Image: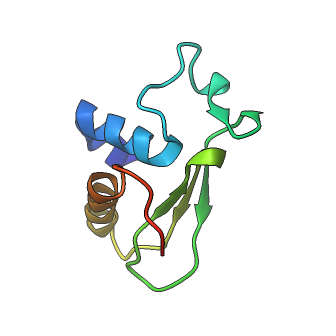
């Protein structure tokens, strides 16, 4: 969580957009976060795959797949890259 606290307001907004597909937190807070099937809690899941991979988001489910990183610095670097490059639209692999 220390990474989230260190982000600027605009970086936090970009993260929220990346992870949920919404640019703003609901007025009633995270308890009212909407997903594909109505109210959907935000969740973080440990992702498999190669070390140092980028995190990925499932905006319909308000879910973030987070790989294991070697350090907090690496995680922040990957987070900032993901929200700047992956927040603008849909990418297909």
Residue 29 in the image: above or below residue 66: above
- Depicted 53 relative to depicted 57: above or below: below
The answer to which of 60 and 56 lies nearer the viewer is 60
Residue 37: percent from the left, percent from the top? 77, 38
> Which residue reaches farthest bottom?
50
**Residue at the spot 59% in from the left edge and 67% down from the top edge:** 46
Where does residue 24 sit, x and y in percent of width and height?
43, 26
Residue drawn where x is 49% and y is 71% of the image = 67
> Up-down: is 24 above or below 40?
above
Q: In the figure, residue 62 lies in which quadrant? A: top right
The color scheme shown is rainbow
Q: Residue furthest right?
A: 37
From this viewpoint, which residue is outermost toward the top? 27
Tally the marks: 0
Report the residue at 36% width, 50% height from top: 87
User: Who is closer to the viewer here, 72 or 35?
Assistant: 35
What's the residue at 47%, 86% (across, down)? 50
């Amino acid at each position: 969580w220390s990474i989230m606290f260190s982000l600027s307001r605009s970086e936090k907004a970009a993260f929220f957009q990346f992870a949920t597909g919404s640019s703003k937190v609901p007025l009633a807070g995270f308890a009212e976060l909407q997903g594909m099937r109505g109210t959907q809690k935000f969740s973080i899941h440990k992702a498999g795959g190669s070390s140092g991979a980028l995190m990925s988001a499932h905006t319909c489910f308000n879910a973030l797949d987070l790989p294991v990183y070697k350090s907090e610095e690496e995680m922040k670097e990957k987070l900032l890259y993901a929200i700047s490059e992956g927040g603008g639209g849909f990418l297909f692999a």
